[in-house]
């Protein structure tokens, strides 16, 4: 899998914005077959930032969400602004 097929799109819900501000996390919907190391590598290549941790969750609709913890030197709000979420 390449980085473009792993990452589908970012989420911009109220919860996602709250996590950006309080815990420096971003939420992406990713491919259901993608594993955590693949997701981490794809995010680091795509956005040129350091990923600390990746947690995944499959929601009721069957979509896989990746909760990406970013290193403190890169604010999640800045990345969200680049993506056009803020």
Image: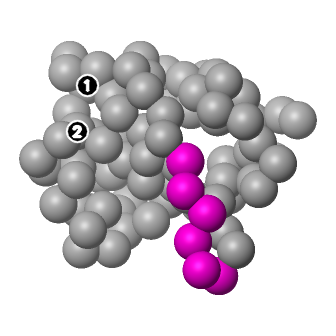
Picture quadrant where residue 32 is located: bottom right
Q: Badges 1 and 2: C-beta atoms under 8 Å apart?
A: no
Residue ID at (72%, 36%) = 35
Q: Where is the C terminus found, in terms of image quarters?
A: bottom left
Residue 1 point in image, percent of width and height: 88, 35
Instruction: Judge left or right: residue 58 versus residue 53.
Output: right
Q: Which residue is mark 2?
A: 24
Q: Secondary structure at mark 2?
A: loop
- The span shown in magenta is 56-61
- Residue, x 39% and y 21% (percent of image)? 52
Indicate which disc residue 11 carries: none
Q: Secondary structure at mark 1?
A: loop
* Mark 1 crowd level (few <14, some 14–19, many ≥20, 10 Å Cα): some
Which image quadrant is residue 2 in? top right
Residue 26 at x, y = what percent?
Answer: 37, 47
Q: Nearer the viewer, residue 47 or 57?
A: 57
State the mark number for residue 74. Answer: 1
Measure how far apart labels 1 and 2 are at the Cα level: 8 Å
- Note whether 60 is above or below 38 in the view shown: below
Q: Position of residue 84 (x, y in %)?
A: 38, 60
């Amino acid at each position: 899998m390449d980085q473009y097929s792993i990452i589908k799109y970012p989420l911009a819900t109220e919860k996602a914005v709250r996590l950006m501000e309080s815990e420096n996390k971003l939420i992406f919907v990713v491919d259901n077959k993608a594993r955590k190391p693949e997701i981490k590598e794809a995010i680091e290549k795509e956005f040129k930032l350091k990923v600390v941790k990746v947690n995944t969750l499959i929601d009721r609709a069957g979509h896989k969400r990746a909760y990406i913890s970013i290193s403190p030197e890169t604010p999640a709000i800045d990345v969200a602004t680049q993506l056009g979420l803020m």
